Amino acid sequence: MTAPAASAKASPPVWLPIAVLGAAQFVMVLDSSVMNVSISQIVADLDTTIQGVQLAITAYTLVMATMMLAGAKLGDILGRDRTFAIGLGVYGLGSLTTALSPNLTVLLVGWSLIEGLGAAMVMPAIVSLVAATYEGKQRALAFGLIGGVAGAAIAAGPLIGGWVTTEFSWRYVFAGEVVIVAVVLVVRRRLKATPAVEHRPHLDVVGVLLSAVGLGLVVFGILKSSSWGLIAPLGAPTINGTEVTPFGFSVVPFLILAGLGFLAAFTMWEEHRERAGHDTLLDRTLLRIVPLRAGLTTLMMQQLILLGTFFVLPVYLQVVLGLDAFETGKKLFPMSVTMFAAALLGPRLAAGFAPKRVSQIGLLALALASVVLLDTIDVELDDSEFVIALALFGVGAGLLLSQLGNVIMSSVDPSKTNEAGGLQGTAQNLGASLGTALIGAVLIGALTSGFVENVEKNPAIPADVRAQVAQVAENGIPVASVGDVETAARDKGVPPAQAKALAADYGDAQLQGLKRAILAVAGFALLSLWFTRHLPGRVAAEVPEAERAPPDLVSAAAP
């Protein structure tokens, strides 16, 4: 009688693994949103430029996207637990380096490179460890929790980052991450180790290089499409003072095509290794699993919608309404609450309506929330309607976050969870890049064309000023406050009355651009319904008592 009791006491509580993995997930996702709201203070502290900090943000996304498959494969080579711990250690080192950065170069090394490499190891390991630790209803609830934590981190990032940056320094955010990582590393020692794979493969270095370069060029091209132009050149890059515009086009499609070429070479290389009986970086048979493909593509669209929205809303709140980073975070907080609650509710809904239906309901909620947001985009904010829209958006995002991780990981054999986790991380980062780039391109394009059109129709603006505006618009009109536009016009010698008229035309174009961007979000949400058609649609049968989540996990999951 005593032996079983001792054994039971030695086993960690069922909620402890998800608490450890959830804490790691929160830190991974929090990082990007914190950096976005801290740009101004980082520029001042490091004596750099906004473009320099944006380079760091872009490089961080690139490193994660390009190394995610390699990070997942390391889980098979070193073991999931060890890869998770090593990745956290690397990430913590990067956070410490970032917190102590004296200049932009060190920030690039610490945040973009070291943290990016750590995240590429940790994120696939998180989903793999969840799949290995839990089964049945517990697994569905655990993935719902992980999704809710990710959503909460996205929405709470501006609030946390804004407050810490405003009251203290952006450096404290990264110092805090070091502390959290250290605590997670200590607590994880109490977790039960997952079984090691029977055959530990060798790392396909050539495959890593081909996939990294291919994904890197594609993601970089997508990220730069809003500033360099998608097809027509817009603010083209220069080499020795000469603009790079191949055949008169933007360099972006050539970067993407080159990336696709490297990915094609990666596919041929993997086929060669497979025929030769060597280990491959990716088991390509996974991509033939229909539910897995549906989960990955829907996840990519989910990230596109979320990150596109989180690009537009801060622009509206900070540039149009003039709110600071902390106030912006507070305005977005209702989304975080409903997102987390819906992520917890999602697995229970899936038991009755199936993941396919829950995901479709989530996408429809996102589309409806975007339509409601359209009515709030004005120089005066309707607080109640804005809160309703954000709450509805959080519900839709939470329902999606609760389903897709479980669908992806449940579609593969347990021995393939690391590779599935790598594919999931790649889809997440690709969707995030697409969201920022495409929604940003819609905003900039609509702002530019609308401003030029307004100026052309305004009789208060003389022909020479119209010509100047048209010339500036060739490289894209930047997003700025109406006051800054009026000041810039006066600095260029435009008379006060004409400068005020220009600023008014700009403000109108800016609101229209924001509305078109939100409308694009709604369109992508509706388009995403097409990708859900192959998600699991079977209505789940009654779950046996043995498979139901125990009360301690459910109570620990409660918000």
Image (cartoon, grey):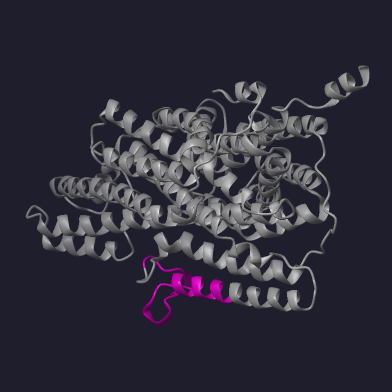
Q: Is residue 124 above or below residue 226?
A: above
- Residue 370 vs residue 35, the one in the foreground: 370
Q: Position of residue 420 (x, y in %)?
A: 65, 55
The answer to whether residue 55 is left or right of residue 434 is: right
The C terminus appears in which quarter of the rendering? top right
* Quadrant where the image shows the N terminus: top right
Going by the image, does 373 lie left or right of 264?
left
Query: Which quarter of the picture shows residue 504?
Result: top left
Q: Is residue 39 visible?
A: no
Q: Looking at the picture, does residue 68 appear above or below residue 256?
A: above
Question: Relative to 529, is 6 on the left or the right?
Answer: right
Q: Is residue 264 visible?
A: yes
Q: Position of residue 306 (x, y in %)?
A: 44, 45
Whole-percent x, y for residue 425 in the image: 60, 52
Whether residue 489 is in magenta: the answer is no
Dividing the picture into quarters, in which one does residue 213 lie? Answer: bottom right
Q: Residue 448 location in percent, x, y?
A: 27, 58
Q: Is residue 195 left or right of residue 223?
A: right
Residue at left offset 68%, top offset 36%:
21
- Nearer to us in this view, 369 or 453: 369
Residue extending furthest top?
2
Residue sitting at the far bottom: 247
In the image, the segment drawn in magenta is 234-261
Q: How many marks?
A: 0
Query: Observer-nearest residue: 302 or 472?
Result: 302
The residue lying at 59 percent from left, 51 percent from top is 408
